[in-house]
Structure formats: C-alpha cells, structure tokens
Image (cartoon, rainbow, N blue to C red):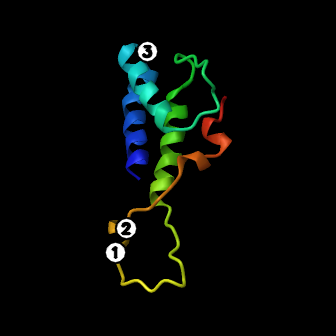
Amino acid sequence: MNVIRRAIQLLNVLRPYVANGNFDHRYIQALNEYLQIVPTPLGMQIDPYIIYRSVNDVDYQKELLNSLLTTSTPQPAAVAVAHIPESTVEKVVSLKTISKNFWRHL
C-alpha cells in the first residue's frame, strides 16, 4: 500500500505541472519516479510532454489508485484469526494487475 500512496503523492506533484503546461526538470524527475512504480504500456520511448494531455488524465489515475487503497481483501475461511481492525492490516495489491484502461489515451 505504501507504493500506491507514493504513486498518488507523485500524481499530486505532477498535476500542477500538467495544469500549467510546465514540464521542467522537476516534472521529469517526478514522472520518472512515477513510471518506475506504475506499470506502463508506453515502452522505452516516452514523450514526457504528452503522457498527460490534461489534469483529467492525472485525476483519472488518482481515482483508480485511490480505489485500490479502499479495496478490501477477503480473509481465508480456513484460518481462524483474532479480530484485527481492518485499518491495521496491511493489504497487498499488485500494481501489475492494473488494467490497460489505466492509461486510457495511450
């Protein structure tokens, strides 16, 4: 879950750059870090200036990542476990399972 939270933080960093069309070296650094975390069908030849066409693209990905944070994982029925508050249980979500519509315009 920490990876998802970091990806969301990076999208929050990227959003103002996309909104202002300011793609300086800080945007490139944040985008590079984000792309190391989140699988992409973009391959190695990425144009960092058109990866996000608008803040809507950034917001769309933030919504999908936030939905992964709220997804609960079922407990195995065969295992008897004392009740642990859900907020203290670390959930495992693989970003490799992100569907292709995550990058909806590519």
Q: Label 3: how many residues lie within 10 Å, few (<14), some (14-19) or many (20+)?
A: some
Q: Nearer the viewer, residue 87 or 58?
A: 87
Q: Which residue is mark 2?
A: 89
* Alpha-carbon span between mark 2 and mark 3: 38 Å
**Residue 8 in the image: above or below residue 93:** above
Q: Amino acid at mark 2?
A: Val
In the picture, the disc for residue 23 is 3
Residues at discs 3 and 1 in contact (Cβ within 8 Å): no
Query: Does label 3 or label 1 sit earlier along the sequence?
Result: 3
Q: Label 2: how many residues lie within 10 Å, few (<14), some (14-19) or many (20+)?
A: few
Q: Label 1: how many residues lie within 10 Å, few (<14), some (14-19) or many (20+)?
A: few
Residue depicted at 48% across the width and 42% down the height: 62
Q: x and y percent of residue 25 in the render?
A: 38, 14
Residues at discs 2 and 3 in contact (Cβ within 8 Å): no
* Alpha-carbon span between mark 3 and mark 1: 43 Å
Q: Which residue is mark 1?
A: 85
* Alpha-carbon span between mark 1 and mark 2: 7 Å
- Give the SS element for disc 1: loop
Residue depicted at 41% across the width and 83% down the height: 81
Q: Nearer the viewer, mark 2 or mark 3?
A: 2
Q: x and y percent of residue 35 in the render?
A: 50, 31
Query: Does label 2 or label 3 sit earlier along the sequence?
Result: 3
**Residue 88 in the image: above or below residue 101:** below
- Give the SS element for disc 3: loop
Q: x and y percent of residue 63 in the render?
A: 50, 46
- Give the SS element for disc 2: loop
Q: Amino acid at mark 3?
A: Phe
Q: Please give left or right for residue 6 compared with residue 68 in the image.
A: left
